[in-house]
Amino acid sequence: MNKTRLEAFSDGVIAVIITIMVLELKVPHGDELASLAPLVPVFLSYVLSFIYAGIYWSNHHHLFHAVHHVNGRILWANLHLLFWLSLVPFTTGWVNESHFTAIPVAAYGVVLLFSGLAFVILTRVLVVHHGRQSLLAKSIRGDRKGKISVAMYAVAIPLSFVNVWIACAIYAAVAAMWIVPDPRIENAAS
Amino acid sequence: MNKTRLEAFSDGVIAVIITIMVLELKVPHGDELASLAPLVPVFLSYVLSFIYAGIYWSNHHHLFHAVHHVNGRILWANLHLLFWLSLVPFTTGWVNESHFTAIPVAAYGVVLLFSGLAFVILTRVLVVHHGRQSLLAKSIRGDRKGKISVAMYAVAIPLSFVNVWIACAIYAAVAAMWIVPDPRIENAAS
Amino acid sequence: MNKTRLEAFSDGVIAVIITIMVLELKVPHGDELASLAPLVPVFLSYVLSFIYAGIYWSNHHHLFHAVHHVNGRILWANLHLLFWLSLVPFTTGWVNESHFTAIPVAAYGVVLLFSGLAFVILTRVLVVHHGRQSLLAKSIRGDRKGKISVAMYAVAIPLSFVNVWIACAIYAAVAAMWIVPDPRIENAAS
Amino acid sequence: MNKTRLEAFSDGVIAVIITIMVLELKVPHGDELASLAPLVPVFLSYVLSFIYAGIYWSNHHHLFHAVHHVNGRILWANLHLLFWLSLVPFTTGWVNESHFTAIPVAAYGVVLLFSGLAFVILTRVLVVHHGRQSLLAKSIRGDRKGKISVAMYAVAIPLSFVNVWIACAIYAAVAAMWIVPDPRIENAAS
């Protein structure tokens, strides 16, 4: 099986996830600048979730760049990743509805944590399928960034009960770390 | 006519179906863990419907892997399948709204039954077009899994009037049976 | 410019249009079979609109099969078609909300009429670009079906003020005429 | 990295943006022609936003026609453009809810302004990557239209506080300027 449809389907799901989140941005009732004020945190959480969706799309793009063929196991590892990503609009909405209280902010981190784990699993399944000597396996050896992200989410989740802004800062820090594209695959593939 | 657009269109429709179902996960009003409790069955039905959408996408992917060309009849057999799949978010929503009562759970099964039949029809139309001696025809000969699924739905629907959880267990069992990708096509194509 | 992205974009828009219409199917409040009764006309109008979206996608597929290259004018003729198609969920919803009264049923026909005209225009623009001696031009010479459809809509719209069911029957008749794929292009292309 | 997925993802996001805006067209409660009257400005703003989405898709199509390869920086410049475009349904909705008052009309312009800037940035990043002597660089040399658009938005935004219709007229004028496809790239590429 070739990878084209897996890529196209993932692109479709992530594209819809990104645009569904815009629906969270409810049109304000007033027509003054002040009526935008309550939207500011909503907007910021939209920006963060947009960036996360962008990171996963970008990393997915990088990862599958080095993939040659897929099997049923890879299809399901990929669907598993898309499942957790599809919950991001839900937790983003809950964080906004609750005005950034502990449980929703922690739940946002839990979904990020499972998305991160799902990406690590997808990477492993791909490496097993392509062999440990493949370009793919070499280019992601160690996958340090993925593991660090998962560790940071695991730290952020309990910290959201201490102070939600610490947790949010950690989520933003992980995002910042990922925006720089992974030079390992880019180098190996060039 | 080539199959590329049929695949791309199907990918698009299934991707939107999957993400529309997330909209069913209404953000809870409270910000405590307890406020997630009423969402648990909703979440589980979302998971099941997500898996069903994933199964159909995955089987569609497997099936069209061995397809070489399409005609108008195949386009419509495929649209017919997409029609029934597009009703899954509706029946999922009804099951959730009604808190798992008999008629909605049976309706969920009816949509699965017709989706299953639509997949069987699509398979037949493809076999007729490619010829009984084609790789496609050989690889799906008998299509036992498809027929068993349809039979299990047909059993589950009346049983939902006895006990909805029996019906739900059968729906889950069919899903479990399908998550394992179809080795017949994979073997024939390799 | 090649036609790949125009096809992919059109597939995406039509896929979203089809699935947005499912959102019109509001989950009933009761959990009895009788609570589905008020949904029957809604369901039928959803089926008709789904078929129309399928027809346009299928005809688009057939038409672009014979297309070799596109230009800016073709992009906009295609966007013009997508614009009218994107209004189908709106008129479908209005017909349902109003329980099939004259003006909404006529409006449904107006959107179909403009969609039909947009398809005729797209066909013309493509023929001009490919030349009157091209395979494309020969295969759609006359485009009788397209013109008959437009004429039938033009008849149905005023008739919806006499009896809405006559108009609906004409809309369904046009759909039935189109479900049979266009043998002209299929023959010419084979 | 090849450009296929970047194009497919952008097509998906813009397709969803266009169709989400249709959801703004709320079905009227009455069933008379008069009940459409309050929808007229909503409809016109939908038409304008549809045209803008079409312009960006069309220009994106033209621009990437001459692109050969992409890198992480280009992925993010593209996501940045999609981010601003994804806000168009929000500002379109606000303009409609407020019945065309100053702040929402200005906000509509701000989103257009940032979309325009994002397109300019994307163009620059592509030129840097392909080299100043590339076909791409030559074909968009100066990018006068892009700069004029940004300047016109910058003028329109303050003018919306004088008279919203002046601002709207400028938005429409920029759209009209862009509907004509860019002959520079088309010529260079032919």
Image: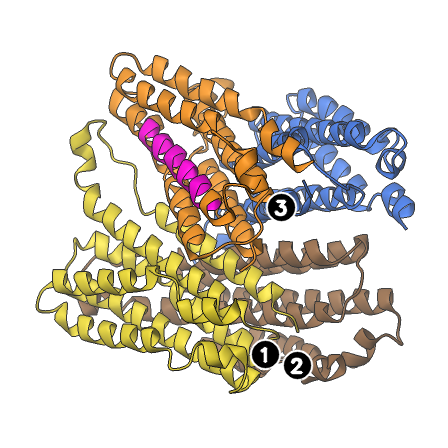
Chain colours: A yellow, B brown, C blue, D orange
SS at badge 2: loop
Q: Position of residue A117 (x, y in %)?
A: 36, 76
Which dot, 2 or 3, sits closer to the camera? 3
Q: Residue at x 66, y 78 (%)?
A: B151
Q: Which residue is mark 3?
A: C5
Q: Which stretch is magenta?
A: D108-126
Question: Number of marks in the image?
Answer: 3
Q: How far apart are labels 3 and 1 at the CA level?
A: 28 Å
In the image, residue B84 sits, relative to residue B55, either above or below, namely above
Quarter occupied by residue C13:
top right
Task: Write down the chain letter for disc 2.
Answer: B
The amino acid marked with disc number 3 is Arg
Same subunit under labels 2 and 3? no
Residue A72, numbered circle:
1
Q: Is residue B15 visible?
A: yes
Q: Nearer the viewer, residue A64 or D141?
A: D141
Q: Locate residue B105 relative to residue C161 in the image: left or right.
A: left
Q: Which residue is mark 2?
A: B182
**Circle 1 residues within 10 Å: few <14, some 14–19, many ≥20:** some
Which dot, 3 or 1, sits closer to the camera? 3
* Mark 2 in CB contact with mark 1 (< 8 angstroms): yes
Q: Residue at x 46, y 53 (%)?
A: A16
SS at badge 3: helix
Q: Main secondary structure of the magenta part?
A: helix
**Circle 2 residues within 10 Å: few <14, some 14–19, many ≥20:** some
* Residue A70 highlighted magenta (yes or no): no
* Residue D116 highlighted magenta (yes or no): yes
Quarter occupied by residue D28:
top left
Q: Position of residue B107 (x, y in %)?
A: 54, 64
Q: Nearer the viewer, residue C117 or D144?
A: D144
The amino acid marked with disc number 2 is Asp
Which dot, 2 or 1, sits closer to the camera? 1
